[in-house]
Image (tube, rainbow, N blue to C red):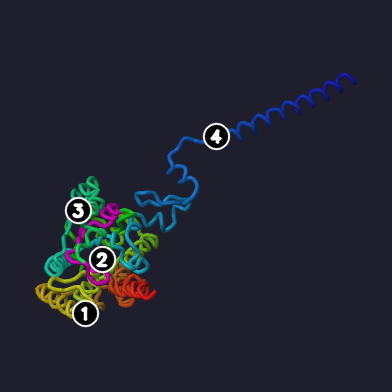
Amino acid sequence: DDYFSSGSSFNTTKAILYGGAILILLVTLFDTYFRTPIKQTADEIMGAALPHVTSDGKYHGRYPNSLLTLFYPFTLFRDVVLDQPVDVNDVPFFWHAHVSDEIPVKKILKTCYAADLVELNTEEDVEEAKKSKLVSSLASQERVGPGSLNEQLYNGQRREPVVITSPYIREVAELFTQENMGRMFSFYRHPIDYDVHPNLKKKLPPEAVNNFMTRLLSGIHTGELGFKELGIGKQVIRQTTVAGTRDLMSESIFRIAKYLGWVPVGGEGTKLSEEKDDTIAHLCIDEILKSYPGERYADHNSFEWRAFYKANKMDCQLYELARSTWRAQIQTIIPLTLQKKRAGEGDDDEKKDEDEDGEE
């Protein structure tokens, strides 16, 4: 009995010793593994750790359902209200989903403001723009940025602006960079009055006929739509768009131009010429719009209307939000000259500083 008892005790002691040695070895191995630097790119290391934005504008972090992740590539558009004054490096972008908005607005931009339009009407145009790094190229040619201000006009105003135009929003958004972000303006209309650009019709499948705009903005072309997709559409309208509506096109274009600081053809762009410049712009815009039809209306009490609304409820909500945004932007989308003044960056502020320095 003593023999077996001592043998059993010996085996237990051995098990404890061996087990302890194995545990120490495992701890050492794990410690070495975690302390040894892994050969990864900076983006890979950061993506696994701290939230950050890479040079292409994509957000990387721990929360895949955060707005910063869901909202890409629209994160490359400026917040049109919060990001004021309009930065000289920003690039104006006219998104036209509807042909009957595209034609008159382009004519006004070219005729009334002598705008230099960069038209990306097909997917091939967009792909070519990506390959050539269009936005960076515009900046290097000084067609946008500080070098494009060839004439010193009051409070940062400019003539002959460069404007990128396209029916494609998500694809064109990826062209912009953190150095040259997009300033988007667009026109929204009721779903019953849609006049969708033919190239967009090719892009989305036939089953995307209902709630077309929600599908286009969210990137969900087939299947069920939910609050997430509707929320992305709402964010685009409310946050990244200087909004125009079809029935208020004249006022919308005038507001957009003042916000971006564009001087009309024949305008002077001085502090004293503001009223005269505004009159020139209004007359030019209204003259062109006379030739184009207005918005259509439907009988909201008809059976056909109720069926249409049920099938396109999300797009109807986006339209109502666009109208609400337009009204809100009466107060928030203000002329560039006033933006500069409120930020203390106006020409009057600079002159005041120089006078004070002279007195000293």
**Which residue is under mark 1?**
272
Looking at the image, residue 30 sits to the left or right of residue 14; the answer is left
Crowd rating for badge 4 (residues with CA inside 10 Å; few <14, some 14–19, many 20+): few
Crowd rating for badge 2 (residues with CA inside 10 Å; few <14, some 14–19, many 20+): many
Q: CA distance from mark 2 to mark 1?
A: 28 Å
**Which residue is under mark 4?**
36
In the image, residue 57 above or below residue 266: above
Q: CA distance from mark 3 to mark 2?
A: 23 Å
Q: Earlier in the sequence, mark 1 or mark 4?
A: 4
Quadrant, the N terminus: top right
- Which residue is the extreme one toward the top? 3
The residue lying toward the viewer, choosing from 183 and 326, is: 183
**Which residue is under mark 3?**
202
Q: CA distance from mark 3 to mark 1?
A: 50 Å
In the image, residue 164 above or below residue 260: above
**Amino acid type assigned to the residue bearing label 3 in the image:** Lys
Q: CA distance from mark 2 to mark 4?
A: 50 Å
Front tag of 4 and 3: 4
Residue positioned 22% across, 76% down in the render: 251
Indicate which disc residue 185 carries. 2
Front tag of 2 and 1: 1
In the image, which residues are magenta? 152-176
Crowd rating for badge 3 (residues with CA inside 10 Å; few <14, some 14–19, many 20+): few
Quadrant, the C terminus: bottom left
The answer to whether any part of residue 304 appears in the image is no
Residue positioned 36% across, 66% down in the render: 83
In the image, residue 265 above or below residue 119: below
**Amino acid type assigned to the residue bearing label 4 in the image:** Thr
